[in-house]
Amino acid sequence: MKKSRGRAGRKRRRKHLQSFMDGVNCSHELEYIKLKKWLKDRGFEERNLRPAQFQDTGRGLMTTKGLQAGDLIISLPEKCLLTTSTVLGSYLGEYIMRWKPPVSPLIALCTFLIAEKHAGEKSQWKPYLDVLPKTYTCPVCLEHDVVGLLPEPLRKKAQEQRTMVHDLYVSSKAFFSSLQPLFAENTGTIFNYSALEWAWCTINTRTIYMKHSQRECFSLEPDVYALAPYLDLLNHSPNVQVKAAFNERTRRYEIWTNSLCKKYEEVFICYGPHDNQRLLLEYGFVATDNPHSSVYVSSDTLLRYFPPLDKQRNAKISILKDHNFLENLTFGWDGPSWRLLTAIKLLGLAADEFTCWRRTLLGDVISARNEQQTLNITAKICHFLIEETQHVLLQISQLKRNKENLKAHLALVEALRLEDLKILQKSAEILCSLNTATT
């Protein structure tokens, strides 16, 4: 009989499965040993949090003791934080201070990250740089084919993000060239577009908010970034509450939990009440069963359900624009949003009801006909979005088979679209119930 059979084998399998569910401890890995020693030299010693690999979230931190509401999760000394003060105190400081027009705090940090990564073994920040992601999944990093599969409002923001990072690179080229005396290699090779994209994603996805006083050597853009080694291994959950701030008395960045966490479970923090589109745009991931998630309805999708021959159509659209009712129209876990229903009600006003448009914006019932029409059109829009989402999921499935190199990026968009589908199906059920109640 094989050893894996029988009670002892079942126990081993259960133990292995449980350890994978709880998280596989990675503390023994060389990069984390070096990081913890580096942090200890800067006054940080963490006894209760361990780097681990989790099935659902990937790399994160597990706790070796149960946490209660009000417990301190982590307290990171100021010396461990990478801020614009770090950059100004480095070999880059004099170049930044004399450059006109002044560079932004963001570009200063990007420049430092690129330069230190290039320095390799000579970098004082190497133990931290070694644990940073080598690649990211923010929209700016996604292939053009993958961006095209994003929902329409997010697709537009993704394209804006790509343009913004490209413009940032072009506008910073002259400053990068001014750093040539510091490097034997050509700065054009060191500070190339992909290097800036990596640095920008590192700052955009991993920094904590920490306000710094305005300095003349920087542009007027807010200086609010701080990279926080080890702390930035904490993953996001929409279902936890934390209090995070820099403690001016202790000169440490502290995070306190308002949630319970069992021993050997992953410790989460909350980046804010963001929906999945915002999480993907800013951080490059989506959260399963995110209570804040919504499916957005574009104005183009909305308007296709109203006759172009309506003489008051342009006036109705102008009213909605003026009162900001053509944006943030959504379906959520609790069905269509009030804003979406209100926009549909106003667009559906009959000629003899149009003078009541102000009452419509206030949420008044105008007529039974208008109410029923609103439910019908909302249901049609919901079903259209369900079909569109299912079509895109089919495209993703086909691309995953044909384009191995895009698998990780496609899986991310697939997760977003699957979450959207669940929300839309839930909304369709709610609308069906409302329709049944009114007929």
Image (tube, grey):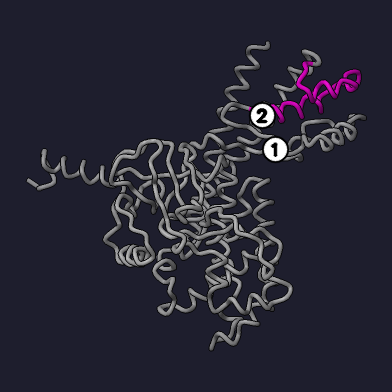
Residue 161 appears at what percent x and percent y?
66, 57
The question of residue 343 being in magenta is answered with yes
From the image, tell me which residue sits under label 1: 328
Residue 337 is labelled as: 2
The one nearer the camera, 75 or 349, is 75
Label 1: element kind: loop
- Give the quarter of the image for residue 225: bottom right
Q: Is residue 240 left or right of residue 22?
A: right
- Give the quarter of the image for residue 122: bottom left
Label 2 to label 1: alpha-carbon separation: 9 Å
How crowded pointer 1 is (Cα within 10 Å; few <14, some 14-19, many 20+) is rated as some
Q: Residue at x 70, y 66 (%)?
A: 219
- Give the quarter of the image for residue 310: top right
How crowded pointer 2 is (Cα within 10 Å; few <14, some 14-19, many 20+) is rated as some
Residue found farthest to the right: 311
Mark 2 or mark 1, which has the lower sequence index?
1
Q: Mark 1 and mark 2 in contact (Cβ < 8 Å)?
A: yes
Q: Looking at the figure, which quarter contains the N terminus?
A: top left
Q: Is residue 246 left or right of residue 99?
A: left
Q: Looking at the figure, which quarter contains the C terminus?
A: top right
Residue type, label 1: Asn
Q: Is residue 258 left or right of residue 162?
A: left
Residue type, label 2: Ser
Label 2: element kind: loop
Prevailing secondary structure of the magenta residues: helix
Residue 221 appears at what percent x and percent y?
69, 60
Q: Which residues are magenta?
A: 336-365
Residue 373 appears at what percent x and percent y?
75, 20
Q: Residue at x 62, y 37 (%)?
A: 295
